[in-house]
Amino acid sequence: MRERSPGLSPKEKRRHLPPGRRLTPDEILSRTVSPINGDPIISRAYTTKNIIGVDLGGVTCLLVDIDHDLLEPEALNLISSPKVKKVVAEYFLPDLERSSIVDTNSVARSFAEQAGGRLAFAEQLAQNLRALEKDVIVADIANKPLYEYYKALRVGLAGFTTLTTATFGLAGLPIPAAISAATSIHNWIVEYQEKKGNGMFNEEKITKSEKLLFDIEEVRRIFVSKGLEQLAHNMRESGQEDGIIVALYPRAHGLRIADMLEHPGKRSNTLKGGLAKAVTPGLEYTLREYEYGSSNDEEENDWNLKEIQKIRTASIRPTNRRLLH
């Protein structure tokens, strides 16, 4: 990538995160060897099957495929490496508890029943990472019962329809029937793809047709990719360019998040992210970092929310960072 200025200082260069570059299995293996004896900590077979690697300006981002049933031993070996500076979880029990998913109200219970193994996996992950003394970051908007409500409405194109309908109504114009019809067809396609595991839920490839869709599941991926960019940016600024970020996501999500990291300047993603925030009030478009230890007012150790950082779609530069203790 061509630099904006040949005279940039090292500090200035770190402020400009280049587009991600996909890593080969050999590169992933070379970057994850034990810093103690140089031995591999994950196998080639596991790497090829379960890991998608992206270089973010020198920071290694590894998207590790998980199935919400069991955190495999090789995944634990990878996370336990001192080279791994950040662990990003799709679901993390303290984050779900904080957002009232694990609660007694009927909406939360309904979500918990639908979530099934995801909640059990989130609890297992909290226990494993506590033992490894690793901080955990959550960048996902799917941490509230409210998300399931928006998902049931298939928010995305539906949000665009709502804004368009309101605009036509305020202007005193008839609402085009084509808009309502397009929304119904779009939502049916997305729901069908999710059930069948194809289209935007295909674990092997990204199809051209899915890029025409706009669904809240895609919005999740957009903000996770931007969150990972911000983490890499923060690590570069703090001199951790050789560090590793491990993000635990199912393959269909990981494949598309990696693609977004490789193509961060897509205007369509910026527009989709901005529109989604406008029509989904109440969701958390933030990075939430948790650490295990005692809080100021409690003697017993527990997971505590350490920092919140807003995720922006238009810029990777960290803004509105708030230390909580």
Image (cartoon, grey):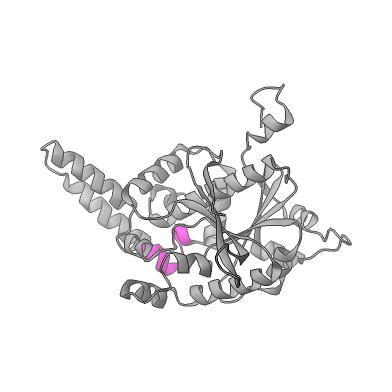
Quarter residue 144 falls in: bottom left
- Considering the image in quadrants, where does the N terminus appear? top right
Can you give x and y, in whole percent of width and height, for residue 75 in the image? Answer: 68, 68
Judged left or right of residue 178, residue 11 is right
Judged left or right of residue 250, residue 219 is left
Can you give x and y, in whole percent of width and height, for residue 32 in the image? Answer: 77, 58
Judged left or right of residue 182, residue 200 is right
- The residue at the point 48 percent across, 38 percent down is 314
- The residue at the point 58 percent across, 49 percent down is 228
- The residue at the point 74 percent across, 68 percent down is 77
Provide the major secondary structure of the magenta segment.
helix
Q: Considering depth in this image, is 239 or 232 the residue closer to the camera?
A: 239
- Considering the image in quadrants, where does the C terminus appear? bottom right
Can you give x and y, in whole percent of width and height, for residue 174 in the image? Answer: 11, 42
Residue 171 seen: yes
219 in magenta: no
Q: Considering depth in this image, is 287 or 26 the residue closer to the camera?
A: 287
Q: Which residues are magenta?
A: 191-201
Looking at the image, how many numbered discs can be counted on the residues? Answer: 0
Q: Considering depth in this image, is 149 or 311 the residue closer to the camera?
A: 311
Q: Considering depth in this image, is 219 or 283 the residue closer to the camera?
A: 283
Residue 294 higher or lower than 10, as above or below: below
Can you give x and y, in whole percent of width and height, for residue 38 in the image? Answer: 87, 60
| Residue extending farthest right | 37
Residue 206 seen: no
Judged left or right of residue 169, residue 104 is right
- The residue at the point 79 percent across, 65 percent down is 41
Quarter residue 151 falls in: bottom left
